[in-house]
Image (spheres, rainbow, N blue to C red):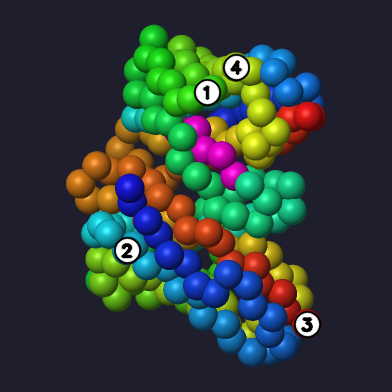
Amino acid sequence: GAVVSQHPSWVICKSGTSVKIECRSLDFQATTMFWYRQFPKQSLMLMATSNEGSKATYEQGVEKDKFLINHASLTLSTLTVTSAHPEDSSFYICSARSRTDYGYTFGSGTRLTVV
Amino acid sequence: EDQVTQSPEALRLQEGESSSLNCSYTVSGLRGLFWYRQDPGKGPEFLFTLYSAGEEKEKERLKATLTKKESFLHITAPKPEDSATYLCAVQAVGNEKLTFGTGTRLTIIP
């Protein structure tokens, strides 16, 4: 089955620093990758959609200069949280859509804590 | 705007006690309805995709059904390992994005 690897699984950083989260489709090529944010006991909120070689499309209210997305290849997308603040602490999840069966596969998530 | 509402918000069942979870949706043309399972601190795990009213899919103790307005996830004789949050999501025609419901937290008591 399709597998999406997301790293790191958890990270603690100091306020003002930047953190990069990697999302990689291991056994398939992804037409599109999605980044979500999830608060405790809440559902997934879509932050942005990215296609390989194109600029990401951000949802309303998401700061594109704070959450930088790079989709360098058909198997890799990265999310960089720049100048992180405690309010950016959350659970971030990526998803990749296969270009063959068009299914959506999710990564295991990254718990970001900003102190 | 596409909307997904899941009920109940939380459900506690005794082991072996069958029940159903509901997902009501409004979408401008349904491309697909997805069910996922999410364990604490993990990403969603794919369960089913349903594409048209009347469609049913089964996997072990789970069975998903779809009508034009809602989907049900039936769980038969659940076990404690079925405890998780179950998420429903819809994809509209012409749109790659998924719209998620808030989920049902299912707890199976031994």
Asked if marks 2 and 1 fall on the same chain, the answer is no
What amino acid is labelled 1 in the image?
A: Leu
Whichever of labels 4 and 1 marks the residue nearer the N terminus, that label is 1
x, y percent for residue A64: 50, 72
Q: Is residue B40 visible?
A: yes
- Cα distance in 3D space between marks 4 and 1: 7 Å
Viewer-closest of A35 and B65: B65
The residue beneath circle 4 is B76
Crowding at mark 1 (Cα within 10 Å: few <14, some 14-19, many 20+)? some
A101 to A111, vertically: above or below = above
- Cα distance in 3D space between marks 1 and 3: 41 Å
Q: Is residue B91 magenta?
A: no
The residue beneath circle 2 is A26
Circle on res. B62: 1
Q: Which residues are magenta?
A: B34-38
Q: Residue furthest top?
A: B54
Crowding at mark 3 (Cα within 10 Å: few <14, some 14-19, many 20+)? few
